[in-house]
């Protein structure tokens, strides 16, 4: 079964896009293809993680 994880891509702390990938490394690779000149500005947050925080 191909399970993908959805990551929220943030650029400079602002939402940019949702990326679906098998793991964090693959998501990071996709994000760097979108913004190759600004890897330091990119943050990836698994959506399941912030959903857990909302339920608290």
Image: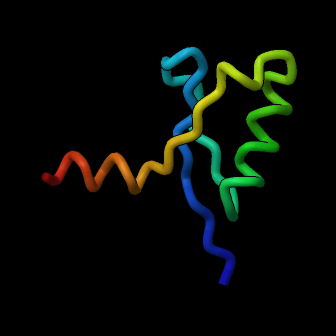
Residue found 73% across the figure and 43% down from its top: 28
Q: Position of residue 21 (x, y in %)?
A: 68, 56
Horizontal arrangement in the rendering, residue 55 relative to residue 21 (left or right): left
The structure's colour scheme is rainbow
For the view shown, which residue lies furthest in the bottom direction?
1
Numbered marks: total: 0
For the view shown, which residue lies furthest in the front direction?
40
Q: Position of residue 3 (x, y in %)?
A: 62, 73
Residue found 52% across the figure and 39% down from its top: 8
Q: Position of residue 13 (x, y in %)?
A: 49, 19
Q: Quadrant of the N terminus?
A: bottom right
Location of residue 56 with respect to 37 vertically, above or below: below
Residue found 69% across the figure and 64% down from its top: 22
Location of residue 48 with respect to 1 vertically, above or below: above
Residue found 67% across the figure and 54% down from its top: 24
Location of residue 27 with respect to 8 vertically, above or below: below
Horizontal arrangement in the rendering, residue 56 relative to residue 17 (left or right): left
């Amino acid at each position: 079964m191909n399970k993908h994880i959805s990551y929220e891509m943030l650029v400079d702390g602002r939402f940019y896009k949702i990326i679906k990938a098998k793991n964090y490394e693959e998501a990071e690779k996709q994000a760097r293809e979108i913004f190759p000149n600004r890897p330091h500005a990119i943050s990836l947050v698994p959506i399941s993680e912030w959903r857990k925080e909302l339920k608290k």
